[in-house]
Amino acid sequence: MKQKLFACFFLGVLLGLFLMQTMLGKEMNRLHYEKERWRIELYDTLEILKNHEERLKSQQFMVVNDVITNLYSVNNHIDSFTELELKKQIREIVKTLIGQEIDEINPKLVFKLLDERLIEVEEKNFLIKVRSVIMAEKVIFNLEAEYLPELQTD
């Protein structure tokens, strides 16, 4: 009798497990399918996002935010006040560069903007020569200023 009871109990457990597997198996398969579908959709969305970000990066334009002038004296006739005035006049000349897209600026024209230019400060003439120009978000001019006493206007 105990063996029969044990066999019926064991058979009931097996039948219950079978029914539970049948009912929950379909749900588990559906959830597994949905999880894989979401994973594929996430992968596709991330690929689209990556492509959009790359396209956006290639379309971003660097814009000139500031102009810096480094001024060097050739014949030491520039005091600090004259240097300030020279830098002020030079900044006035190059201020149109601020806000422009770097890709659209012609570097040769930027170089020629100040190269071999005469600037008068305190009734003294200075010849400005461009040593170098660095074009980035901050355009940096390295300039030489040479005092020209022979061009003095009296």
Image (spheres, helix red, strand yellow):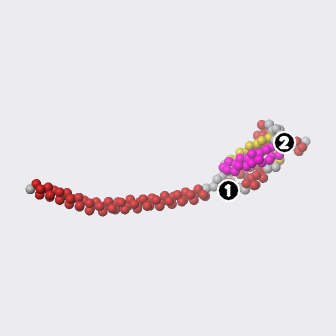
Q: Hey, which residue is sitting farthest left in the picture?
A: 1
Residue under the image location 86 percent in, 43 percent down: 148
- Can you say which quadrant of the picture contains the C terminus? top right
Residue highlighted by disc 1: 103
Residue under the image location 82 percent in, 49 percent down: 116
Q: Is residue 15 above or below residue 88?
A: below
Residue under the image location 77 percent in, 45 percent down: 143
The three-letter code of the residue at mark 2 reads Tyr
Percent position of residue 110, x then y: 74, 52
Percent position of residue 114, x then y: 78, 49
Identify the secondary structure beneath mark 1. Answer: helix
Residue highlighted by disc 2: 147
Highlighted range, magenta: 121-145
Percent position of residue 45, x then y: 48, 60
**Could you tell me if residue 49 is visible in this image?**
yes
Q: Is residue 23 above or below residue 92?
A: below
- Can you say which quadrant of the picture contains the N terminus? bottom left
The 10 Å Cα crowd at callout 2, few under 14, some 14 to 19, many 20 or more, is many
Percent position of residue 103, x then y: 67, 56
**Could you tell me if residue 85 is visible in this image?**
no
Magenta stretch containing residue 112, yes or no?
no
Identify the secondary structure beneath mark 2. Answer: strand
The tag earlier along the polypeptide, 2 or 1, is: 1
Could you tell me how far apart the alpha carbons at marks 2 and 1 are, in whole angstroms?
A: 35 Å
